[in-house]
Image (cartoon, rainbow, N blue to C red):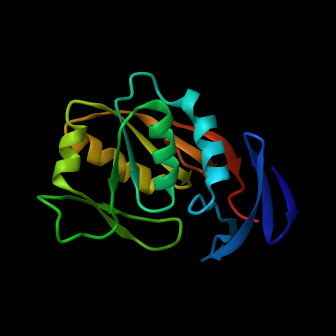
């Protein structure tokens, strides 16, 4: 990973290089913006690189909408491990959803996550790995981990394409991004 200029950061994953634009985030400064949505080549490279890092015994992958969904889908497709997705808004079709607050988000906005009841049932009695595109503070990842526990599953670990910042979670990741540029 090399800094190409203040407005972008170059990263390479599995032979695929991307120039990540940087965006200003509150008082943090400029941070690199990782986008898997609409970038199949980059998503596939990251998924392939993450495969050997999946914690042993993982039976279900858990992620949150939106940017991590194509990544976890490709990991699931390659590994055969099914996945479940938590949402950031309640949907009218949800049945007995679990609700989990996320106290602080990297983007400076507190959020609430929703896990549909039937999805929570898929975690019960399973070893679950939380998968995200980028883990910074770890607030969202911890909220997902609480879903696992509340659903009766066992948290197998945290997996991310990128780590950014000072998360204290026991996290496995491909590359570290600078906290700010």
Q: Is residue 14 left or right of residue 104?
A: right
Q: Is residue 165 left or right of residue 67?
A: right
Give the farthest residue toward the top.
56
Work out whether 100 lies above or below 172.
below
Asked if one can make out residue 164 in the rendered structure from this viewpoint, the answer is no
Q: Residue at x 34, y 53 (%)?
A: 85
Q: Is residue 152 left or right of residue 162?
A: left
Residue 68 is situated, as x and y percent measured from the top left of the image, at 49, 54
The one of 130 and 12 positioned closer to us in this rendering: 12
Q: Residue at x 43, y 34 (%)?
A: 157
Residue 27 is situated, as x and y percent measured from the top left of the image, at 62, 75
Q: Residue at x 22, y 40 (%)?
A: 122
Q: How many marks?
A: 0
Give the farthest residue toward the right.
4
Asked if one can make out residue 55 in the rendered structure from this viewpoint, the answer is yes
The one of 81 and 171 positioned closer to us in this rendering: 81
The one of 70 and 177 positioned closer to us in this rendering: 70
- Name the quadrant of the C terminus: bottom right
Residue 82 is situated, as x and y percent measured from the top left of the image, at 36, 38
Q: Is residue 101 left or right of residue 26?
A: left
């Amino acid at each position: 990973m090399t800094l190409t200029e203040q407005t972008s950061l170059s990263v390479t994953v599995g032979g695929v290089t991307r120039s990540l634009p940087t965006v200003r985030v509150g008082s943090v400064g400029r941070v690199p913006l990782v986008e898997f949505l609409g970038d199949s080549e980059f998503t596939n490279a990251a998924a392939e690189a993450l495969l050997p890092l999946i914690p042993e015994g993982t039976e279900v992958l858990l992620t949150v909408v939106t940017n991590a969904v194509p990544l976890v889908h490709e990991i699931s497709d390659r590994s055969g491990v099914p996945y479940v997705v938590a949402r950031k808004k309640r949907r009218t079709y949800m049945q007995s959803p679990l609700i989990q607050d996320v106290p602080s988000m990297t983007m400076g906005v507190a959020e609430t996550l929703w896990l549909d009841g039937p999805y929570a049932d898929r975690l019960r009695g399973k070893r679950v790995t939380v998968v995200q595109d980028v883990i910074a503070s770890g607030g969202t990842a911890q909220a997902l981990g609480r879903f696992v526990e509340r659903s009766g599953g066992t948290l197998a670990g945290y997996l991310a394409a990128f780590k950014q910042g000072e998360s204290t979670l026991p996290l496995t990741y491909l590359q570290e991004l600078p906290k700010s540029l």
